[in-house]
Amino acid sequence: VGKTSIDGIAVVSGVTMTSKAIIDAIDAAKVHYNEAMGIEDDGSGVVEEPQAPPLNFGDAMAIFRDNVSDTRKGIILDTVEEGGNVIYTVEAAGYAVIEQYPDAKRNIFAITIDPANQVIVGVEVIETNDTPGIGDKVSHEDFLAQFENLSYADESVEVDTISMATVSSVSVVNAVLAAILESN
């Protein structure tokens, strides 16, 4: 506890083989973490600030889907009209809620819609309650940019999910869908 991903761990005398197996497992996890976060272990014990891993897009997902369960549907919390646009504050279940973590909270988004032209003006993440460093990737500007000025007049419209943050990505899409359905 309290060690960095480049700190060494000592074996316990008397149970060297057992503690070595545990340390080997921890070391393997540290290597994976360091690679994912761009941390170089030069053996000096000096920890560099972790860098966010690159955003990798995964599978495309249709915004309009019939199979969204009640648990995962977006819930409209607030509606504000601004000019010809409508801003919906929407919460949607993310990974923590779906996996039923204790005290899990839904993610919250602001979805701006131009209902007259059937366009998603933009999506803003207000609060993400999924795994830090993974689920919060839905706040990345490259992910959110694919929603900007996206026409939903054609119900086959799709966006790309984020690899390793698919469930969190789906929560955004479910929030967007709830806003679109509310605007119709």
Image (spheres, rainbow, N blue to C red):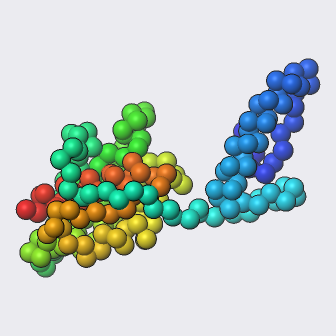
Residue 166 position within the rendered picture, expressed as x and y whole percent measured from the top left: 41, 51
Total marks in image: 0
Q: Is residue 5 above or below residue 141?
A: above
> Visible in this render: residue 180?
yes
Image vertical order of residue 12 relative to residue 43, above or below = above
Q: Quadrant of residue 108?
A: bottom left
Which residue is at 21% across, 51% downward? 65
- Image quadrant for the N terminus? top right
Residue farthest toward the top in the current orientation of the protein = 14
Residue 30: x %, y % from top left: 72, 47
Residue 126: tell me if it is visible: no
**Front residue of this view, candidates 153 and 120:** 153
Question: Which residue extends farthest bottom?
Answer: 83
Instruction: Please tell me which residue is depicted at 54% across the width and 55% down the height of the picture.
Output: 133
Q: Is residue 115 left or right of residue 87?
A: left
Q: Looking at the image, which residue is at 76% across and 42% down?
A: 27
- The image shows residue 145 at horizontal and vertical percentages of 36, 72
Outermost residue on the right side: it is: 13
Q: Nearer the viewer, residue 62 or 27?
A: 62
Measuring from the top left, give residue 61's x and y in whole percent.
31, 56
Quarter of the figure with the C terminus = bottom left
| Left or right side of 91 for 23 | right
Q: Is residue 177 left or right of residue 140?
A: left
Above or below: residue 86 compared with residue 129: below
